[in-house]
Amino acid sequence: MVAVNTQGTTSTSGSVASHGSGGADDRPEPPSVDVLALALESTQVPFAMCDARDLRIVWANAAFEQATGYDAAGARERQRRPVPPEVRRHGEMAALRARLQRGEPTTAELSIPRADDSLFRCKVHFSPVPHPGGGAPERWIVAFEDRTERLTHDAEQARIVEAERQERRSVNIIVQVSDLLMDVTDRVTPLHEIAALLRRTVVRWASFYVNDGGLRPLDAASDLRPPSGRGSRHGETRRADGGDEAHAPQDEVQQLLDGDKDRPVELVLDRAHPRASASHWLAERIARETSGDVTVGDVDGRQGRGGVMGGGRAFVLPVPGRRRVIGVLVVQPREPGELDEATTTVLELIARRVGLVLDNARLYDREHRLAETLQRAMLPQQAEVEGLDVWTYYAPNSENAQVGGDWYDVLQIAPDVVGVVIGDVVGHDVEAAAAMGQLRSVVRSYAYDVTLPGPVLERVDQLVAGMRIPRAAGLVLSTLHRDGEAWRLRWSRAGHLPVLHVREGQVTQLLGAGGPLVGFGGGQRDTAELVLAPGDVLVYHTDGLVERRDRDLREGLQALAQVVSAVTARDSAGIGEELLSRLADHPEDDVAVVVVRVPDPCDVAERGRSPRRRRWSLPSEAASVARARHAVVRTCHAWEMPDAANAELVVSELVANAVLHGFGHVSLQLYDTGDGLRIEVEDGNPAPPVSTDGHPGRVGGFGMQIVERLADWGWRQSSRGKVVWAKVRPGALPATGR
């Protein structure tokens, strides 16, 4: 066995003396007082001894002096000074003194000022030194455990955790914003939702404003401040009266809109801003939209009242597009003061993402409108055909922003000859549209010269082969010749879907006179013939009406035949509306439809159930007024609505206004609401209609007054301009006043 002697050396023996034997040689000799004092003085742990009455330090070791910067005398001097506010904790110190007075060993977290005024953060352990004669202790030995490194580490860990939390929150906000922006077109609803998300998460208040030649709120119909101009240059502000004020404040919001600044600017709402400036308008707008009460001042001394919260300050961030600033994001922090760096970063990222997506949406919308306008310009609206009921329809694929190759034509070739053409060029691009325009012009020219469809297509084949049109195309060319009380149909097909012929509910595909695509004939084209009876219907269509991803073309044609056979309407517009409602709710391609019906004398006596909606696309020309009047009269007849004269006058005035004051194609829609006729006319001019007292010195200007006498009316913004609606009151025309 191994034993340890009092001198610390080892020895080996067969046995070890038991501690219970009481041998004096087995007990180590206790250290002397001088050795203990030297140990306390030499240890690296700060120690001090305090007087029990006032806790004044009477002794401290070298480690204490190294940790605090002063010895025992310096510590007593320091204890006489006022306690710094950051370490003054009266409640904790009172509890500590109470425990010490009871003689209880205790531990406390304290911050002790060093000689250089920094803080020595430590855990202090108080232990009583027993009085030799008994009784309450007169001294306390105090050990100081340095907590600086631990607290610094904890603070750093807390900072890292908080930074990670803020980063996760920021990423989550940006992800939510990205999800909302997936639904952005030119609508403003997602931007309202994004502003609400920011209010819930990072700021007290937030709102977007659009820069359309001047700031306006998201849901405003027009600009609410004077047009913007590049002002506030070099500290000068242009006053409303034309004067310059060199010392007037700059229009910092306008500088954001002009691109002169790209960082957030602070907008003090109760500060004087130049009149008719973006800063002044925005300050007043924010004051109205938020809660509270603040005075918005002007540089010329005038003031306006408005509500505000958040200390009367806001921060304005630009919402940049590709080539210009398309709006601003205005926020107010949760706490008064500056925006912190993390919040500013999140807001700037959101503003840039919103700007890019909104700019893309508007660019797409402009391209789509341009493409649709170009496409419709290539689809001439036919004149009214005497003796036939004709309805036409065209709609581009809503998912495609480019022009397509579908087209139709209705031609009054001669008093007793009508030509109907429908065709489709492969593709949805400018090249397809160009090929379509060329073919349409060629077919129109030859159809007026030669009325037999087969020879017309032969000449078209020859010309197209020489023109080297790069796209394949199919079409159906037909002519209808008046033959006494009947009509004789002649047609020829060039690789296009057959026309449907409907007689007494029986549907037949006109498959005769078929041939290859246009330009690939190279020989004789046949012409087929059919005599049409009163009540017969012809349906011309492109493949967009029947073709879907989930079914082949044959199934689509069968579905079309079933729908056509079940139609009960007795006018071409009603037949067309039934086809669209059942087959073209979500077209995957461009859709062109022409419905031709031979009127039946029995239509007056035997009315059929008719769809309660009609739509027409009219060119912006004077002839559209007469066509609209004729359409509404025929619709009122089909729906058995009396007193159609009121509706005829109302639609005449609305379409005339759209032609005179609007731009782009005019859309006319009619609805049977159950208690009257609702008329909607859409054009590309967003300016609202105005009722006037006429134009002095010239005829006209009373159109909306006529509408007011005959109908309840109003208007609303639309994606392409505005819609003016009128609900025609039942009854005869009101009597004129005398």
Image (cartoon, rainbow, N blue to C red):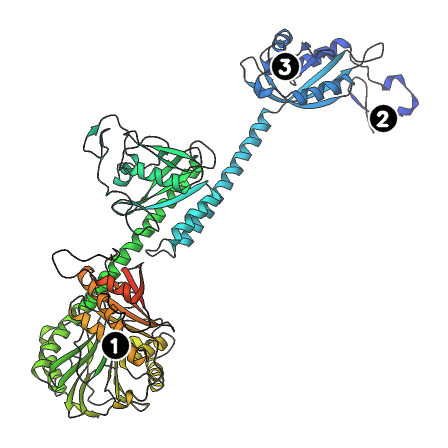
Q: Position of residue 455 (x, y in %)?
A: 10, 86
Task: Compare residues 98 and 635 and report the one nearer the observer.
Answer: 635
Place residue 688 in its image quadrant.
bottom left
Place residue 638 in its image quadrant.
bottom left
Q: Secondary structure at mark 3?
A: helix
Residue drawn where x is 45% and y is 32% of the image: 336
Please say if 509 is above or below 157: below
Three-letter amino acid code of the residue under disc 1:
Val
Res. 64 mark: 3
Q: Which mark is first along the chain, 2 or 3?
A: 2
Q: Are marks 2 and 1 in contact (CB under 8 Å)?
A: no
Res. 13 mark: 2
Q: Secondary structure at mark 1?
A: helix
Residue indicated by mark 1:
633
Place residue 580 in its image quadrant.
bottom left
Position of the C terminus, as image quadrant, is: bottom left
Please identify, in this view, whether the residue under mark 1 or under mark 3 is nearer the observer: 1
Report if residue 425 is visible in the image.
no
Task: Compare residues 319 and 700 and report the one nearer the observer.
Answer: 700
